[in-house]
Image (cartoon, rainbow, N blue to C red):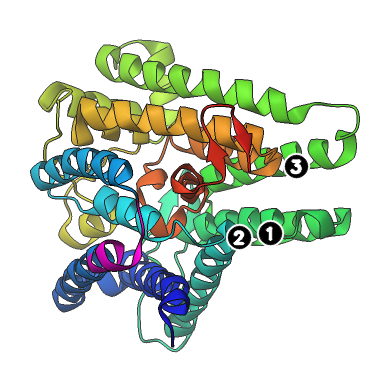
Amino acid sequence: MNKDKLKNIIPILLLLFFSLKQIIVNYSTINQYHMYSKLNHTLTFGIVFLLVFFIIFFCQYKIKQYAAITFIGIMIVVSSFITKDLAIVVFYLFVLALKNIDYKKIVKTICFSQITGVSLILMLFNLGLIDERISTRLGIVRRSYGFGHPAFLSTFYLMIVMELFYLYENKIKYYHIIIVVILAEIIDRTTDGRTNMYCLFLFLFLFVIRKSFRKILDLKTIMYVTNYIFLFLALLCSVYLAAKFNPYNILEAKLNSILSNRLYLSNYFWNNYGPSLFGQPLKFISTLEGSLTGQSVLILDNFYLNLVIKFGLVMTGLFVGFVLKLLKLLYLREETTLLIIVFVFLVYSLISPIIINLELNFIFFAGVFIFQKQYNPKNEQFN
């Protein structure tokens, strides 16, 4: 096998393996066993090593590009070392390694790993090899079907639907959308993943508008501007509500109840840790860990606050710059569906740090475009 074929096959195989590993270990109840958690970390470090090796010996970046890559990489590594979280490092390495891979192939790989991972978890659960977590919310019983949290199944459903609609957008008919809604209702009845369902219906609503009115409505420009404004509003509002939350204010207390105590927890992390420059390690107690130990759940379900508090102001600046450039590239490429999906991710990020999770996140692999030669920043035209 020649070098050119290896350049295309190796990063895709690594992405497939990593994504599938993350789904099985991190999102099923298997992660309650220490041996699997330790194996997961070992495999992650192994993949990091292989990615670095591949980038050095197979990816042909120019000297100036290597300088920029190294500069950004150092800041990411510093933040990762301080926070003891490899998530952003792994994502960054995959973006660099996948620079020559067609974006739709990347989406297909992640989609395949998600469908396979979800199927395996459901199979293990039905065979009785893994247990489930049952909880209640507002009197509604929530089942997890082998996942570590009842909402995970609907999370994967949301991701898979968006991926398939993007890949086959010109073949999607209205009856496909009806089928998606019916399946969503079936899943939601026993898992009560309301955030995922709201985001799914937001995506379907915007997708239908684009499909029905693409000849008379410039949705591409609307979504570009909306994303641009929403990014800053979401970041500012998240910080403001975390810093100023008052549990004795009736309106804020009601909003906190609706958001499942997220405002209180955001305020807790803001007061106990506060913003940082390069990040800091945070003590979390997950829903699964809380159910096993009897401790109160302690999580920061807001991506923007995770950026500011956990990953630091430097990473926050890098993320904002990345998204702004990504939006510009998608606008120039007329990727309206991807602009819609970016918006869904930005909305979702108000109540979940989902963007950090590579195995759930395909849209920001559009950042691969930034490192490809298709874009000429001098004239803002594609070759």
Q: Give the camera-side residue of 378 and 170.
A: 378
CA gap, disc 2 to disc 1? 7 Å
Query: Residue under circle 1?
Result: 167
The residue indicated by pointer 2 is 104
**Is disc 3 placed on a helix, strand or loop?**
helix
Rendering coords of residue 304 (x, y %): 35, 30
> Of callouts 2 and 3, which one flags the residue occurring earlier in the amino acid sequence?
2
- For the question of whether residue 265 can be seen, the reply is no
- Amino acid on which disc 3 is placed: Phe
Mark 1–mark 3 distance (CA, rounded to whole Å): 13 Å
* Picture coordinates of residue 115, whole percent (x, y): 55, 72
Q: Which residues are magenta?
A: 53-61
The kind of secondary structure element at disc 1 is: helix
Q: Is residue 290 left or right of residue 273?
A: right
Q: Which mark is residue 207?
A: 3
Image depth: mark 1 or mark 3 in front: 1
Q: Give the SS element for disc 2.
A: helix
Amino acid on which the number 2 mark rests in the picture: Lys
* Residue pictured at 78% horizontal, 61% vertical: 179
